[in-house]
């Protein structure tokens, strides 16, 4: 797995970008970075799953749990999927796990108003 | 003889890897390791020997490991080697993780070589027929089956998942998305068998461990300090046929109630910290089922001919011809100035009215003897099923070999293997007891 956290865009968005194979062995690092994202002062917070080759259920569970249980986390994190609608692995994963219940899934952060955070679950 | 190139400038790394490889095999296993410490030599070895397995040290800049990897990625049909990668840093490990196209079986850090590599060699040894499929293609039976026992080790489970996913992908049985889905399924179900099955970690125990920020691998190690649990194995079996592959994973625990796993997509459970593995496995397989006791799961993966097959790099620009069942592909007596590369399908070889053989994509070429000897066709070839063929003229073939001479070596090897097979069949006939009427 490769992790990168960037501050990007005109809306001071903070994006945690994941790529490669995200599995059980990555969870400690994943957790640390999610906490950094959630505790940041960025107006828009997102996790970008576009470049993931695959993610196992354990690592996915960690993302869902930490983004929605940490203070200030619930409903405040977007999931970015730039391949939305391409029937990619990540598209399929979002469908079968019904991640839309838990996150707002977007294909771009452009046009997202800082004053209107996603509602999530 | 099983030959493995060890590509590294680091002598100590080579010694450690050689020792760990031998530790994972029996003394009677005939394995030869070939240390290679320069880029040119390594490239030459990959091109000329076309190994099925290669160990590459990605911390050894002198052998330019990423350029070697690009070569393998550039023509995966020819150089379909499974790669065991070694690295010293997390950054290199992450970089390799991003190489989605590479057939990396496992990435091992320097500290893990002694513990992990012997286990991987044990797995590879038990599954040699899938690693060596390309070269001995014509000699393998239509169905490939194997059974293996795995220790309670998530790393070994992950290596196994990658090895099989690579095989199904490089033999065009699944496409790239199918490879990803299959790797996920194997990873999930082998992990379940280890943690819930053999180690008896309950759903609630796992939840507590995760919610306190714990580590499931630590919990597995803790459980395995009990010798009774440590002795338990995951039993894994598979059969790969023409149309699909069937898998069975069984553990030696007391079983778990798979019916009681909460639905992770329901409103009440959608924030659960785990419990989506079975859901993911069902989505990427066909007919996944557990036994009543809950310690065995079976599933099937249907083979679908990928839209973009892995095919020889030299033929990639030639559009395949689509044939229908019953089509005459070659006719006995015709002039032969081309060869067919078999992308898919089954083809019956008829001499007069007698069927002498049936060829498929595992046989790689159709019509190579007449093509090389400039004879008229000595047999008629009929398509038994729908399929795809790439017609390569003599000129195209020669031009291709000028660019990549090692393809000529491959063709020579294929012919040598066919002759060897015919010789063995003659010997068997000659030594068989004569049956009297």
Image (cartoon, helix red, strand yellow):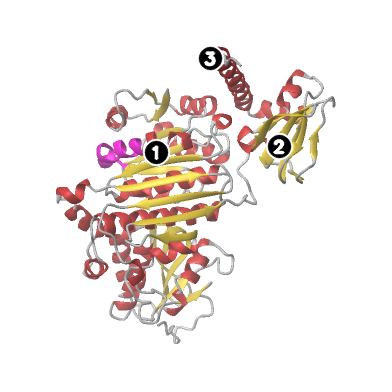
N-terminal of the two: label 3 or label 2? 2
From the image, give the main secondary structure of the stretch colored magenta: helix
Image x and y of residue A69, in percent: 30, 77
N-terminal of the two: label 2 or label 1? 1
Identify the element where label 2 is drawn: strand
* Residue position marked by numbered label 3 in the rendering: B433
Q: Up-down: is B300 above or below B43?
A: below
**Chain ID for label 2?**
B
Q: Is B113 contained in the magenta span?
A: yes
Q: Which mark is residue B84?
A: 1
Image x and y of residue B74, in percent: 57, 40
- In depth, the one of B93 and B378 nearer the eye is B378
Q: Up-down: is B256 above or below B111?
A: below
**Chain ID for label 1?**
B
Residue displayed at 42% across by 31% down: B63
Cβ–Cβ under 8 Å for marks 3 and 2 = no
The residue mark sitting in front, 3 or 2, is: 3
* Residue position marked by numbered label 2 in the rendering: B347
Q: Are marks 3 and 2 on the same chain?
A: yes
**Chain ID for label 3?**
B
Task: Write down the quadrant of residue A64 in the picture.
Answer: bottom left
**Residue B122 visible at all:** yes
The part of the chain drawn in magenta is B109-123
Image x and y of residue B168, in percent: 52, 45
Q: Is residue B159 left or right of residue B396?
A: left
- Estimate the spatial distance between the alpha carbons at disc 3 and disc 1, rounded to whole Å: 47 Å
């Amino acid at each position: 797995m490769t992790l990168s956290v960037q501050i990007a865009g005109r809306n001071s968005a903070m994006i945690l970008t994941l790529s490669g194979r995200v599995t059980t062995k990555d969870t400690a690092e994943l957790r640390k970075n999610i906490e950094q994202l959630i505790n940041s002062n960025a107006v828009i917070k997102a996790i970008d799953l576009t470049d993931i080759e695959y993610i196992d259920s354990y690592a996915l569970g960690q993302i869902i749990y930490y983004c929605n249980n940490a203070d200030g986390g619930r409903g405040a994190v977007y999931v970015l999927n730039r391949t939305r609608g391409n029937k990619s692995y990540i598209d399929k994963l979002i469908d079968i796990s019904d991640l839309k219940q838990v996150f707002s899934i977007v294909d771009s952060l452009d046009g997202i108003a800082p004053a209107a955070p996603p509602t999530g679950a | 003889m099983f030959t493995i190139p060890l590509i590294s400038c680091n002598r100590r790394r080579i010694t450690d890897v050689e020792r760990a490889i031998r530790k994972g095999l029996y003394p009677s296993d005939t394995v030869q390791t070939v240390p290679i410490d320069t880029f040119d030599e390594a490239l030459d070895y990959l091109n000329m020997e076309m190994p099925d397995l290669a160990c590459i040290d990605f911390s050894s800049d002198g052998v330019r490991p990423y350029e070697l990897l690009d070569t393998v990625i550039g023509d995966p049909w020819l150089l379909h080697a499974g790669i065991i990668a070694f690295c010293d840093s997390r950054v290199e490990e992450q970089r390799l993780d991003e190489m989605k196209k590479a057939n990396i079986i496992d990435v091992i850090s320097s500290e893990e070589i002694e513990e992990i590599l012997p286990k991987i060699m044990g797995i590879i040894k038990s599954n040699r027929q899938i690693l060596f499929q390309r070269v001995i293609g014509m000699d393998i039976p239509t169905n490939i089956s194997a059974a293996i026992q795995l220790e309670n080790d998530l790393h070994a489970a992950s290596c196994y998942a990658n090895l099989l996913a690579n095989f199904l992908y490089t033999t065009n049985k699944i496409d790239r998305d199918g490879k990803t889905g299959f790797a996920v399924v194997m990873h999930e179900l082998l992990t379940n068998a280890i943690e819930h099955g053999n180690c008896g970690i309950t759903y609630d125990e796992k939840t507590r461990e995760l919610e306190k920020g714990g580590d499931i691998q630590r919990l597995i190690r803790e459980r395995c300090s009990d010798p009774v649990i440590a002795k338990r194995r995951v039993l894994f079996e598979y059969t790969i046929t023409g149309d699909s592959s069937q898998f069975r994973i069984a553990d030696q625990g007391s079983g778990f109630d798979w019916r009681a796993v909460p639905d992770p997509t329901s409103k009440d459970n959608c924030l659960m910290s785990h419990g989506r593995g079975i859901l993911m496995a069902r989505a990427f397989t066909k007919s996944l089922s557990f036994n009543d006791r809950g310690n065995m799961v079976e599933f099937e993966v249907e083979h679908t001919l990928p839209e973009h097959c892995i095919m020889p790099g030299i033929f990639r620009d030639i559009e395949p011809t689509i044939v229908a069942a019953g089509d005459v592909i070659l006719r006995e007596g015709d002039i032969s100035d081309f060869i067919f590369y078999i992308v898919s399908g089954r083809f019956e070889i008829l001499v007069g009215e007698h069927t002498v053989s049936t060829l498929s994509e595992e046989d790689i070429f159709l019509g190579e003897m007449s093509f090389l000897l400039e004879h008229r066709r000595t047999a008629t070839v009929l398509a038994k099923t729908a399929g795809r063929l790439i017609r390569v003229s003599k000129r195209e073939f020669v031009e291709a070999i000028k660019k990549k001479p090692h393809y000529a070596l491959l063709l020579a090897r294929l012919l040598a293997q066919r002759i060897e097979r015919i010789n063995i069949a003659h010997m068997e006939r000659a030594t068989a007891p004569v049956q009297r009427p």
